Image (cartoon, rainbow, N blue to C red):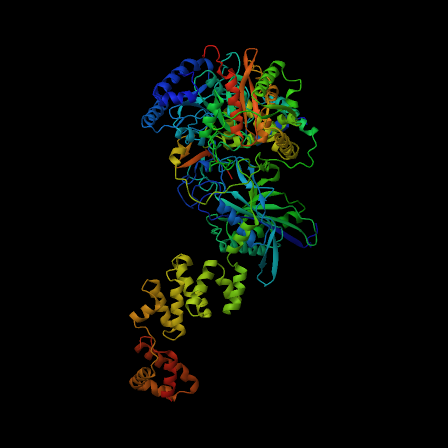
Amino acid sequence: MYKKTIKQLSSALQNKDFSSEELVSSYLQRCDSHNSNLNCFISLMPETAIAQARSADKKIQNGEAGPLTGIPLAHKDIFCTNGTKTSCGSSMLDNFIAPYDATVVTRLNEAGMVTLGKTNMDEFAMGSTNETSFYGAVKNPWDTARVPGGSSGGSAAAVAAKLAPVATGTDTGGSIRQPASLCGITGLKPTYGRVSRYGMIAYASSLDQGGPITQTAEDAAIMLNAMAGFDERDSTSAEQAVEDYTKDLNESLDGLKIGLPKQYFDGQLDASIESVIQAGVKQLEKLGANVKEIELPNSELSIPAYYVIASAECSSNLARFDGVRFGHRCDDPEDLTDLYLRSRAEGFGKEVKRRIITGTYVLSAGYYDAYYLKAQKLRRMIRDDFRSALEDVDVIIGPTAPQTAFKLNEFIDDPISMYLSDIYTVSVNLAGLPAISVPAGFANELPVGMQIIGNYFAESRLLNIAHQFQQATDWHQQSPVGFD
Amino acid sequence: MSLEKSDIDKIAWLARISISEEDTPNYLHDVSNILELVEKMNNVDTDNIEPLAHPLEITARLRDDKVTETDQRKHFQEIAPAVDNGHYLVPKVIE
Amino acid sequence: MATDIKWETVIGLEIHAQLATKSKIFSGAATTYGADANTQACAVDLGLPGVLPVLNQQAVEMAIKFGLAVDAHIADKSVFARKNYFYPDLPKGYQISQFELPIVGNGDIEIQLADGSKKIIGITRAHLEEDAGKSVHDGFFDNTGVDLNRAGTPLIEIVSEPDMRSAEEAIAYLKKIHSIVRYLKICDGNMQEGSFRCDANVSIRPMGQEELGTRTELKNLNSFKFIEQAINYEIERQIDVIESGAEVVQETRLYDPNKNETRTMRSKEEANDYRYFPDPDLLPVCIDQETIEAIKKELPELPDAKRERFIKEFDLSEYDSDVITASRDQAEYFEDTVNAANGEAKLSANWVMGELSAVLNKNNTDITNSPVSAEMLGGMIKRIKDNTISSKIAKQVFEAMCNGKGNADEIIDNQGLKQVTDTGAIEKLVDDVIAANPDQVKQYQESPADKQGKLIGFFVGQIMKQSKGKANPQQVNQLLQEKLK
């Protein structure tokens, strides 16, 4: 039953082919047997999962079920779950039992979903390999000597290995799309403000956005239906009405205008990746799309702008971890200063500290204009590039990541190379646009994702394109050996 | 812009993160590299560009002035490292 | 250094006024003062991981009201910024404040000094921000206890220009702002509870010099008296420092009211680098002209205007008008009293400032909780005016009203306090008293005219006693003088 999409699971549950409890038990068993190898989960929640499954079964019996009732899922450990450890991949929060539910968690609970557990992630979502996690690296199910990508690596690996039919993720600079690409699954980063950030532990507030990690675009649409929507607890959440994201899935792609940014295919892109993307684009042309080359002249600057803004925001967002009200506190502090200095030094890992130090520096007196303000100006230029490009084309297509999954430890002491691998994803966060990564083929037997970037709140269109692509291809149905 | 050890010391203090003497050169090296990377920004003329703080240029929605929260002190303090008589405890602060 | 230099003091004030909203500026927790520690600190106030702020509309409107009251520019776009520093009473490690784009821009107010002279004081800006929690240093052995109930209470910080030249001017300015925020009902003004606080920037320079001297910032000023003492102490201290050949150091100084002195808290070198940047969790606040106009229409009459109007309309003295309009509630009570008293303003003013004020003081309450309503007080004053009761009997009636015995007319009826004005009845009382006291009559008639005035008092007293105070004193006097001739 773990081979099914959530769309299929839902019909099976409604048809009483099996109960939610049977389904959930089966997944929990699968998690048990594979987690020690893959390290996808920080916490598994068998007791609450079975209880949730039983109550879902009652709803199904009573005919009160919705499309997600009784479907298991995994939450990235960045979403607060009341009564359960919410670690954010950090030693700082190893003892943190969240006292409330994130809005996303509430919404999916209300939709009747069953939480299997909390997935591993780069510490505080800072990383592109999942190796910065306090709980150790997640292994890529396609090759366990490789990383799953990050920061939502645990969620992506869990869905790829079918330890959960679907998972939540968050994307600040590519953290949903890049691991989806590296694990051969579908990952959607919605428009900034589409999904509430309340209860999602902040990394960089003006960039963070939650979204679904799924096997198919159709599943992503079903998930987004439940996740999206205005939240009065999040000032930055969009008041725009939520549409039914499944309604346009079967629209034809006839006349679709695709833009290929010249800067994404500039010769530096690995040829094996490029050929996968070009083949994907060809496929879409066959489905009726027209392709033209476009310009995103400032895309190279998105990495510097992103690392300045994200570091600056994180340096402030992570100031609340001070050992006073929750989280790690050092033993026997001598005085207040000692309490702060040691609790934070002990609680945060290396990459987090690097970014806090960088962010503190770029905001400090005398450097604010040269770094932070400059980055914000570039952010406008980058956003405007996308805006004008999207006046001519409906969507922009390119690779999700410049490479397939890295080897474990490849970048551990080379943060700059790791940062540079975010080249195709961070600009989308700077602009606040929605984008989806769909499996489009393989390079050296590792999955390659194709990124489709749309206009603000055009998630329906993205899901439609991705779904049509998946109707015509079977890349998303490939399973890693040992997990099929 | 090259960083010096004293910069790292100052910034680490502002961020309240203690960095050991032996770790300081690593941070100096890494953060200098990051700054070198971001200094590519200086190649672009941004003179007439307005900074953009938020991707969607929308304005604040305001909340009605209503009390919606109830006392959850017990629940919230269960996860606190040190409390006494409803207060969070820190080592004595001298003013 | 020559000691015959005349020094000029330059003072600027930063006032923090807590806004009287029901809930906090960025959360739905209550703002009630005095609750048990941390019972009014919700997830947002505690800065739990993942929480987000949502701005309180009422706080914004209150800030706009203040801006309009001091003729300031209201920003069509204002932005919240984070002020980053670590302190136990600051849960998030930053305070949400406003930096580059405050909600209220340049404004000014007029102050009046004891000698009657007037002066305009500029207001640089006023911005919205959240209050911090409180550290409790006693009762936790080697620890400090942190109570975050106050964290997130809305504040406006009102920053003045360095326009004040003496402690007297500073106090006049502060009192003016205090009265404005209370008139606007945006702040309860309670300085003991910390809802109205003030920091003072003080410097001195040789008279005539344009350039400002080095300033110190005085903190911990929680009463008008302490502010005045602290500023005066600091002026003297700075003069001493300079005249002894040393230099004033830019620093924050704490005022100790027990010792009446200021002492160093932190110097500029130790000052924080606050790393202000726009809060990415909050969007810009945009205020359109319509909103401003609508709020403008709701503004109450402000203290200056009311004071002037009372002088003109009710013929009050400047002093009386000052006292009456010191608070908006008292001024409104007074005006309601006058209306209920058929326009009798002078008596109303006397009663409000006199008996009523004494009763309120005695009961330690304020005019909004007065045991006697303005209608009741006005009703009684009407009876004084139409001679139903004398001023003396009125005190008795007022006391009965305070004790809940009903309104003036009921009390006068029930207790038979109506003044006797019937000439026949008074004449009979006069005749009886004269007949009963032949010796005193004789003494009176034999006395020289200038002594008679004193002696007549005896008869008046006897008659008032017989009438239980109800005989009209003027009529009694007149009849006695006629009959004793």
Q: Residue at x 59, y 63 (%)?
A: C116
Residue A460 vs residue C176, the one in the foreground: A460
Q: Is residue A26 visible?
A: yes
Query: In front: B93, or C84?
Result: C84
The residue depicted at 45 percent of the width and 60 percent of the height is C330
Classify C426 as above or below C401: below
Above or below, comparing residue A260 to residue C459 in the picture: above
Provide residue C432's location: percent of width, then percent of height: 29, 84
Tell me if residue C280 comes above or below residue A342 in the rendering: below
Task: Please identify the quadrant where the C terminus of chain C is shown.
Answer: bottom left
Q: Quadrant of residue C339?
A: bottom left
Report the front residue among C468 and A1: A1
Give percent across and percent down for residue A81.
42, 28
For residue A270, side relative to residue C425 (left or right): right
The image shows residue A182 at horizontal and vertical percentages of 54, 17
**At 30% from the left edge and 71% from the top edge, which residue is drawn?**
C413
Residue B19 visible to the viewer: no
